[in-house]
Image: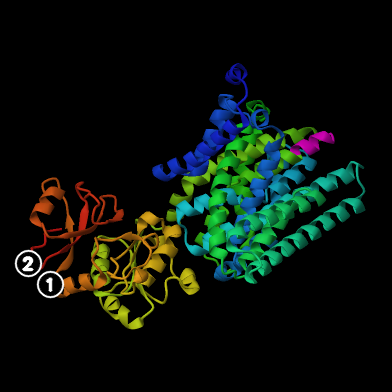
């Protein structure tokens, strides 16, 4: 703390800028290094907070720290609720119901026992903290799922459980705390239960009312497009604040219910709202993790002893797996998916924030070990974030739930060009899927042994049927420029704009017929259209795969094939890179170039 005392507190604006820069910077660096972003954010917060004293949220931001974290968590849970569309559950619905109705109370009981016998807490603190531990943390699960690219069903189970059980865990802690007050004669049983019941009813009612009001107003055109997001944010904050005023922590239930209602209201502008909220959530998750890590005091952690390690081990190896496996017993889920969900239970900001609050409340009414709840929560979050952040992908691969191969190519359109390109990529050992809403256009792909999907890739059926996680690159290659542009624009947020391409558009002499250049994907292979590429294939050109060596590198390949059109390459590590006409060639040994070669030019040996 000497540094902070010498230099003084940070200006609040500088403090907020520091939190934003470190949070977003950690996420970007994690993307570049292909490692868990949560781990970097946790480390960054600890470095600028307790390790160096550069930033102290209470000192530098003041009394607003608590409300900022509460509102951020509310927005995060609301955004999570926006992703919970019932139509996306399908075969995961039974598992989600079991994890909520059986897993939540069972998890509360098992966690309470672990806290009492493992961590050594009294029954009062164990019951309150055990309720909070129902929470698994959507702030952590979402980034992990984005990076792990798990199959749809286990990903849905983890996502729904994390979001739905978050407010349930907070309310369970409220219930346990009210019981403690009754036992200590601070409050009567009827008063405690009545307040809890009223709070839950009001929170649920406010959430439904807020969601219904937004849905009706947006559908009937009562709100102009440019005001939809501001009004949505305002209603969200009002619903959260009123509900929290009636019963503390019930605001989390209200905003989750509101988000789920809107997600299932089939709003025409739903996707735009959801994507904006996703972007806001990335900022908020970053900021909240930095704030909570920076707020931790090493003095609190020194209160813990060897029992803390026993507690964490029991939670990870006993409490979580036991709860999930018992909850899912008798379901039709395969064993590997049950084990994956059971061994994946990272905790996040909601656990730390709510645990700290109730730890202080218990201490205020004379529960001595209430002060241990906050440091135990922080240790649990830190360990599970690091553990699951680094082990989720290899563990999923061990269970056969994540492909060891690199993501492949999704081709939109069953043309001759798509078939030839798909065969070349398949020959390189990567997965390929050819999609087309016209069944007759898929006959050629089927004849060549390429996997196909008959239907519109933008349809809801495709979302449920196609394992998007198997593909990392998209090429829109139909004979309809408008459709190519629509597909590329729609899929860009999910795949990343750098990984979505479309073929050259038809030349138009009239500006009124030209599509905006701001829409669509990256130009693939120059300005040639599908007709021009198909004409070359008909004239004898072919798409070939050429392996580079120390002796035969990119320079030699270009000299040998001066008229060839490079389409992409597969790196020595198996990563697919499709290119534009101006992209430089990767000339590393063992790189396999994918190129369109003239008929008269001999193909190099693979």
Determine the image quadrant of residue 6.
top right
In this rendering, is residue 444 above or below 185? Answer: below
The foreground one among 521 and 404 is 521
Please identify the residue farthest to the bottom as the structure is shown. Answer: 440
Q: Secondary structure at mark 2?
A: loop
Circle 1 packing at 10 Å, graded few (<14), some (14-19), many (20+), is few
In this rendering, is residue 310 above or below 197? Answer: above
In this rendering, is residue 410 above or below 554? Answer: below
Q: Position of residue 414 (x, y in %)?
A: 30, 75
Q: Position of residue 227 (x, y in %)?
A: 62, 59
Which disc number belongs to residue 540?
1
Circle 2 packing at 10 Å, graded few (<14), some (14-19), many (20+), is few
Chosen colour scheme: rainbow
CB contact under 8 Å: marks 2 and 1? yes
The foreground one among 229 and 417 is 229
Q: Position of residue 205 (x, y in %)?
A: 77, 62
> Magenta-highlighted stretch: main secondary structure?
helix
Q: Which residue is mark 2?
A: 600
Report whether 102 appears left or right of 604: right
Q: Position of residue 57 (x, y in %)?
A: 64, 32
Which disc number belongs to residue 55?
none
Mark before the other along the chain sequence, 2 or 1:
1
The residue that appears at 75% across and 43% down in the rendered structure is: 126
**Looking at the figure, which quarter contains the C terminus?**
bottom left
Q: Magenta part of the protein: which range?
A: 359-366
The residue that appears at 45% across and 58% down in the rendered structure is: 493
Distance, label 2 to label 1, CA atoms, is 8 Å
The residue that appears at 27% across and 56% down in the rendered structure is: 580
Is 339 covered by the magenta stretch?
no
């Amino acid at each position: 703390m000497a540094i902070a005392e010498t230099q003084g507190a940070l200006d609040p604006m500088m403090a907020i800028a520091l939190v934003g820069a470190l949070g977003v910077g950690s996420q970007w660096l994690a993307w570049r290094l292909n490692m868990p972003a949560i781990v970097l954010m946790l480390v960054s917060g600890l470095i600028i907070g307790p390790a160096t004293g550069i930033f102290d949220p209470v000192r530098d931001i003041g009394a607003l720290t608590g409300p900022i974290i509460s509102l951020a968590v509310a927005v995060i849970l609301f955004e999570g609720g926006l992703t919970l569309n019932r139509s996306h559950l399908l075969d995961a619905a039974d598992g989600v119901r079991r994890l909520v109705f059986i897993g939540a109370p069972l998890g509360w009981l098992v966690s309470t026992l672990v806290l009492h016998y493992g961590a050594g807490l009294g029954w009062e603190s164990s019951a309150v903290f055990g309720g909070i531990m129902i929470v698994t943390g959507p702030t952590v699960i979402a980034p992990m799922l984005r990076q792990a690219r798990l199959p749809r069903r286990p990903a849905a189970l983890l996502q729904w459980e994390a979001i739905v059980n978050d407010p349930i865990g907070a309310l369970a802690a409220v219930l346990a705390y009210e019981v403690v007050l009754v036992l200590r004669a601070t409050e009567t049983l009827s008063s405690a239960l009545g307040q809890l019941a009223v709070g839950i009813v009001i929170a649920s009612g406010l959430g439904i009312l807020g969601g219904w009001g937004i849905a009706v107003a947006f559908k009937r055109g009562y709100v102009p497009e440019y005001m939809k997001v501001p009004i949505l944010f305002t209603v969200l904050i009002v619903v959260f604040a009123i509900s929290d005023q009636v019963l503390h922590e019930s605001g989390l239930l209200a905003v989750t219910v509101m988000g789920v209602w809107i997600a299932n209201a089939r709003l025409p502008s739903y996707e735009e709202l959801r994507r904006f909220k996703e972007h806001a959530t990335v900022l908020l998750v970053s900021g909240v993790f930095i704030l909570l890590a920076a707020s931790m005091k090493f003095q609190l952690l020194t209160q813990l002893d060897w029992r803390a390690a026993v507690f964490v081990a029991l939670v990870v190896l006993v409490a979580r797996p036991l709860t999930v496996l018992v909850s899912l017993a008798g379901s039709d889920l395969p064993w590997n998916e049950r084990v994956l969900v059971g061994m994946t239970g990272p905790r996040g900001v909601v656990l730390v924030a709510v645990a700290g609050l109730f730890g202080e409340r218990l201490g205020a009414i004379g529960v001595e070990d209430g002060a241990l709840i906050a440091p135990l929560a922080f240790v649990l979050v830190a360990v599970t974030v690091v553990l699951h952040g680094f082990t989720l992908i290899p563990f999923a691969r061990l269970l056969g739930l994540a492909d060891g191969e690199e993501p492949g190519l999704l081709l939109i359109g069953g043309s001759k060009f798509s078939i030839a390109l798909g065969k070349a990529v398949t020959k390189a050992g990567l997965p390929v899927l050819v999609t087309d809403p016209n069944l007759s256009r898929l006959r050629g792909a089927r004849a060549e042994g390429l996997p196909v999907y008959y239907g519109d890739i933008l349809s809801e059926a495709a979302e449920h049927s196609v394992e998007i996680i198997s593909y990392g690159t998209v090429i829109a290659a139909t004979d309809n420029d408008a459709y190519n542009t629509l597909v590329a624009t729609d899929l860009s947020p999910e795949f990343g704009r750098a990984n979505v391409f479309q073929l050259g558009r038809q030349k138009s002499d009239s500006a009124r017929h030209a599509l905006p250049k701001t829409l669509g994907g990256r130009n693939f292979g120059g300005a040639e259209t599908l007709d021009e590429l198909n004409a070359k294939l008909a004239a004898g050109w072919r798409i070939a795969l050429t392996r580079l060596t120390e002796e035969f590198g990119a320079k030699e390949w270009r000299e040998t094939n001066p008229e060839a059109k490079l389409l992409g390459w597969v790196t020595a590590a198996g990563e697919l890179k499709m290119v534009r006409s101006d992209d430089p060639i990767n000339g590393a040994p063992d790189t396999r170039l994918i190129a369109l070669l003239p008929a008269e030019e001999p193909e190099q040996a693979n």
